[in-house]
Amino acid sequence: MTLRKNAENEKLVALLENLELPDMRMPARQRRLRESLLASSCFAKPDLSTRKKTSGGINKMKPQVWKFSAVAAVVMVFLALGVYLAFFAAPRAVAGLVLQVNPAVNLTLDERNNVIDAEGLDEQGELLLAELDVTGKGV
């Protein structure tokens, strides 16, 4: 450990050097405890290059696995979005069509020109729609 040049820290250095550490049976823990106590603002950073690097886990994955995982995640997101839009999104009305031949009928259409809603505008239109089910059918 190297001390930064500051005369006020001599007392702290003496206390830390003579510090009684708890009785530990693992010397690695004792060394780490001493290093962490001595690594304060008045000391330079200790050399921790002797620490054993942990192996395993997500850091050991190869770059090809990362690329495959990223592509698979993007594909799954787009697939989930497509399924949601295809099956669970409510149809939006984008057009209205009024037929006034003899019976007057108002049809509401979606973006695929399928009938979302049908409404009779007079008595004959209501009677016609009572007999026919046009919702979900193309124009």
Image (tube, grey):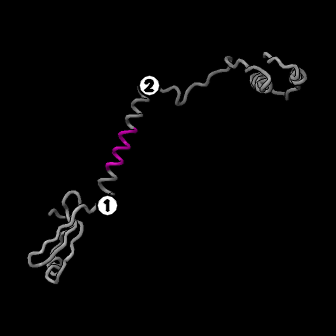
Q: x%, y% of residue 42?
A: 80, 23
Choose between 115 and 52: the one closer to the eye. Answer: 115
| Left-right relation of 19 to 63 | right
> Where is 128 relative to 137, above or below?
below
Residue extending furthest toward the left: 101
The residue lying at 90 percent from left, 23 percent from top is: 11
* Residue 54 within the segment the image draws in magenta: no
Query: Which element type, helix, strand or loop, lies under badge 1?
Result: loop
Stretch of the chain drawn in magenta: 73-82
**Viewer-proximal residue, 16 or 25?**
16
Q: Is residue 12 left or right of residue 136?
A: right
Q: Is residue 139 left or right of residue 44?
A: left
Q: Label 1 is placed on what type of residue?
A: Ala
- Tell me which residue sits at (69%, 20%) in the image: 48
Q: Earlier in the sequence, mark 2 or mark 1?
A: 2
Amino acid on which disc 2 is placed = Pro
69 is higher (above) or lower (below) than 54? below
> Which residue is identified by label 1?
90
Camera-nearest label, 2 or 1: 1
Q: Is residue 26 above or below residue 138?
A: above
* Residue indicated by mark 2: 63
Q: How many numbered badges does the structure rendering display?
A: 2
Quarter of the image where the N terminus is located: top right
